[in-house]
Image: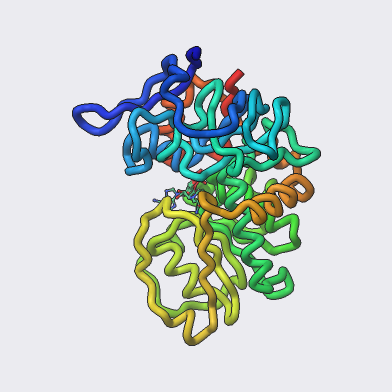
C-alpha cells in the first residue's frame, strides 16, 4: 500500500479544513476499480466542499472533487480492464465517497462511463459535471418535445459552467438563445458561444408577477430562487424549463399560475444519481455535438495546488465558463 497526492478535507473545530497532502491507500473506501486520475475539474459543488460553505462533505476524511477522467490501473469489475479510458462524475464522489482531486482513486466500476471516441480526457473534464448537466437539461427539453421552432431558449447563470455549455449546446441545436448574466462585460464571450441576446440578470432577480409577458419556450436555469420563478412566469404556453441549479438560492418563490394557466412544465435535472444508460447517451451527444473550439474558449487550466483557492473564486462568481485541473 502506498500514498498519493490528494486534496483532503478534515473536520476542524469550526467547520472543515482543506489541504493538499499525501493520502494513504489504506484509507481507501470500497471499490472494484482503481483509476489513475489524469484530469479533474472545478464545479460549484466543489467550491462548496473545498470552502466548507455548504454541507457537501458528509464523511471525514474526504478527498474532494466530484469529477475525474483517467485510465484504469486495475479492475475486479467485469466491464473494465487496465488501460481503459474512463470518466467518473457524481455518485457521491467527493461527498460520501473519496473523490477526484487525487493522483489515484478507487471507485465502483458501475459508476464509470467509457470515454467516448473523439473526446480527450481533458475535454471530458472541460465538460465535467457542469457540461454534463447542461446536456441532461437539453435532452430533457427534447424529451418534452420542445424544438427551436417553438421559440427562444433562456439560459440563466449564463457565464458560469453549466450556463456556458448550455448556451453553446442550445445555439448549436438551432435555438435563439437569450443569455441572462450578472456579468454583461462577458457579452462578447457569450455571443461567441452562440447567444443571440444578452439580458442583465437583474431583470429576472426581483419579485415578479405570477404571469409575465411570454418571452421564451425553453430554458436552462442554474440559479433557482426568484430567477427561476420569473423565468417560469415568462415562459410561453406549453413551454418547459429545466431546473438544474441553485446559485441564487434553493427557494422557489413561485405560483402555480404558469403550470395551470399556460401548461408550462418544470423539468428537474439530477446529474449525481443519473442512471448509466442516460449518462452514455449524454456523453455520446456531447462528444459529437459540442463545438470543441467553443469548449476550448470557455476553459481555463489550473494545477492541483491551485484548486483550493479556485474553490473560493467559483462561489464568489469569479469563474467564467469551465476550469480543468491537471493532475499529472
Ligand atoms: P458556476 O459558479 O460556474 O455558475 C453559476 C453562475 O450563476 C455564475 O457564474 C453566475 O452567472 C450565476 N450566479 C451566481 N450567483 C448568483 C446569484 N446570487 N444570483 C443570480 N445568479 C448568480 O457554477 P456551475 O455552473 O458549476 O453550477 C451552477 C449551479 O448548478 C450550481 O448551483 C450547482 O450547484 C448546480 N448544479 C447542479 C447539478 C445537478 O445535478 N442538478 C450539477 C451541476 C451543477 P453570471 O455571472 O452569468 O450571472
Residue at (51% x, 56% y) in the render: 270
- Front one among 67 and 36: 36
Residue at (47% x, 19% y) in the render: 25
- From the viewer's perspective, tell me whether residue 265 is left or right of residue 27: right
Can residue 199 be seen from the camera position used here?
no
Residue 326, position in %: x, y? 60, 23
Residue at (79% x, 48% y) in the render: 288
Residue 29, position in %: x, y? 45, 31
Residue 52 placement: quadrant: top left
Residue 321 placement: quadrant: top right
Residue 313, position in %: x, y? 43, 34
Residue 59 placement: quadrant: top left
Residue 46 higher or lower than 169, as above or below: above
Which quarter of the figure is the C terminus placed in?
top right
Residue at (20% x, 31% y) in the render: 14
Residue 1 higher or lower than 147, as above or below: above
Q: How many labels does the image show?
A: 0
Question: Residue lying furthest left in this view?
Answer: 13
Can residue 204 be seen from the camera position used here?
yes
Residue 95, position in %: x, y? 41, 39
Residue 16 higher or lower than 89, as above or below: above
- Front one among 16 and 36: 36
Amino acid at each position: 500500500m502506498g500514498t498519493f497526492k490528494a486534496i483532503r478535507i478534515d473536520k476542524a473545530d469550526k467547520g472543515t479544513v482543506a489541504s493538499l497532502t499525501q493520502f494513504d491507500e489504506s484509507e481507501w473506501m470500497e471499490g472494484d476499480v482503481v483509476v489513475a486520475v489524469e484530469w479533474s475539474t472545478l464545479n460549484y459543488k466543489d467550491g462548496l466542499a473545498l470552502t466548507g460553505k455548504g454541507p457537501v462533505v458528509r464523511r471525514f476524511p474526504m478527498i474532494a472533487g466530484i469529477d475525474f477522467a483517467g485510465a484504469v490501473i486495475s479492475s475486479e469489475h467485469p466491464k473494465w480492464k487496465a488501460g481503459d479510458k474512463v470518466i467518473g462524475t457524481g455518485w457521491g464522489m467527493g461527498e460520501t465517497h473519496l473523490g477526484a482531486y487525487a493522483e489515484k482513486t478507487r471507485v465502483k466500476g458501475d459508476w464509470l462511463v467509457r470515454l467516448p471516441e473523439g473526446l480527450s480526457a481533458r475535454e471530458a473534464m472541460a465538460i465535467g459535471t457542469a457540461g454534463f448537466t447542461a446536456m441532461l437539461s437539453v435532452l430533457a427539453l427534447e424529451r418534452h418535445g420542445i424544438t427551436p421552432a417553438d421559440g427562444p431558449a433562456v439560459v440563466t447563470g449564463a457565464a458560469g459552467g453549466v450556463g456556458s455549455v448550455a448556451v453553446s449546446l442550445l445555439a448549436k441545436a438551432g435555438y435563439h438563445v437569450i443569455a441572462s448574466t450578472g456579468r454583461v462585460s462577458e457579452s462578447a464571450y457569450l455571443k461567441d458561444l452562440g447567444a443571440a441576446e444578452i439580458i442583465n440578470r437583474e431583470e429576472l432577480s426581483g419579485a415578479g408577477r405570477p404571469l409575465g409577458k411570454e418571452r421564451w419556450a425553453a430554458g436552462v436555469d442554474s440559479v433557482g430562487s426568484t430567477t427561476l420563478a420569473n423565468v417560469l412566469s415568462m415562459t410561453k404556453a406549453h413551454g418547459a424549463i429545466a431546473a438544474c441549479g441553485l446559485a441564487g438560492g434553493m427557494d422557489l418563490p413561485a405560483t402555480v399560475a404558469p403550470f395551470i394557466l399556460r401548461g408550462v412544465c418544470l423539468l428537474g435535472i439530477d446529474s449525481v444519481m443519473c442512471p448509466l444508460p442516460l449518462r452514455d447517451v449524454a456523453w455520446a451527444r456531447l462528444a459529437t455535438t459540442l463545438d470543441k473550439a467553443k469548449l476550448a474558449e470557455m476553459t481555463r487550466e489550473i494545477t492541483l495546488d491551485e484548486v483550493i483557492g479556485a474553490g473560493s473564486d467559483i462561489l464568489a462568481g469569479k469563474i467564467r465558463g469551465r476550469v480543468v485541473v491537471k493532475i499529472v
